[in-house]
Amino acid sequence: MTRIRSIELHLIAIPLVRPFRTSFGESTEKVCILARVETDDAVGWGECVSDVEPSFSEEWNEGAWLMIRDLLAPALFAAGDLEAELVASVLSFVRGHPMAKATLVNAVLDAELRAQGRSLASYLGAVRDRVECGVSVGIAPSTDVLLEQVAGYLAEGYRRIKLKIEPGTDVERVGAVREANPEILLSVDANAAYRLADIAVFKQLDAFGLLMIEQPLHHEDVWEHSLLQREIRTDICLDESIRSAADARAAIELGACRIVNIKQGRVGGLLEARRVHDVASELDVPVWCGGMLETGVGRSTNLALAALPNFRLPGDTSATSRYFADDLTEPLVLAPDGTLPVPDGPGIGVEPDPRRLEAATLRTEVLEKE
Ligand code: OSB
Ligand code: MG
């Protein structure tokens, strides 16, 4: 048990090496909240996966900042002595807001593990020391540019290519990438841009031997995903629709997906993410680790999670060079075999470099017990 002395919030911005476009919008820089939690014993870091606008989910940076400052942090200070496994129950008086909650769950866990000198991977139950990496490729300005980008990532060693798709260009783009690369593991992510009435598109995509189709329909349409899955051969993977282990169980039992994307931030942090992993494992459904273009803080967190046994497919955590020219932490470098090492230092195993953090910080606020 330990006491939280202070929570320091940083709003940071780092340019992306290339714009990232999905069916819901385009980013040219990564803007997010980092929390630095200081306990009586150690310091821990948590990265919030919300974005500038509430497009991927209802959460967004300014909302998450106020949620943490005005509701979640005061509840943690009031709770007194605490351990990471209790944080979610202390915060459960707030409905929803998994990304804001995850920031604190993960930061408190990081501090706790650093105080014990134990790595996050070992605490979670890692079974491997390297993780297979895929890359998520944004919607490109043209098919030619897309083919060039995909060829570049494959040359670097990435083991799975995921194409962001949207109505209009989907079949042509995916067909072109498949034709140029008949053997690769290829998947697509629609970020909820389609409706059940678009079933003809998915039947055409069936011809390309995709590893999966990620989140084709609206995040609340779990039933409709089950209807779609009955009609197509390709496995559906859910991302946005899964916000808890209970959601994962319901979606799998309903036949709405045969694969689950786990993003710890989307489900309220690392401890719920491990429960999603366990439910999927029990139901013999493979999972893989998604990403939200995190800095080295969030990606190191994700690498530890991706070392659990039921992470059976290459994830979206890519090397630093795929995202940033200058990250907050030391660069994560892809090995020629397309893997990244699971951090083995205490906690998440990395810390933001103070100089880089300062250069990236737009705003800071220190929260303490009243
Ligand atoms: O749907 O998986 C997604 C990035 C931002 C928001 C949503 C998604 C993504 C990605 C990028 O696909 C994955 C990564 O490289 O971090
Ligand atoms: Mg996705």
Image: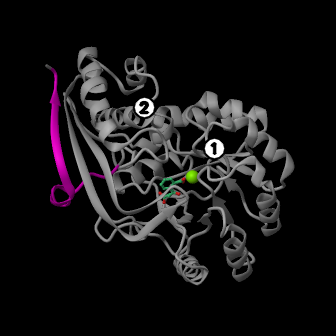
Assign a secondary structure to mark 1: loop
Q: Amino acid at mark 2?
A: His
Q: Amino acid at mark 1?
A: His
> At 42% across and 31% down in the image, what residue appears?
97
Between 85 and 218, the one lying in front of the other is 218
Residue 330 shows up from this direction: no
Using the image, tell me which numbered label, if any, was put on residue 218: 1
What segment is highlighted magenta in the picture? Answer: 349-369
Counting from the top left corner in percent of width and height, residue 367 is at 17, 31
Using the image, tell me which numbered label, if any, was put on residue 97: 2
Sort mark 1 into few (<14), some (14-19) or many (20+) by Cα contacts within 10 Å: some
Which corner quadrant holds the C terminus? top left
Assign a secondary structure to mark 2: loop
Sort mark 2 into few (<14), some (14-19) or many (20+) by Cα contacts within 10 Å: many
Residue 45 shows up from this direction: yes
Please report whichever mark, 2 or 1, sits nearer to the chain's N-terminal start.
Answer: 2
Q: Left of 328 or right of it: where is 40?
A: left
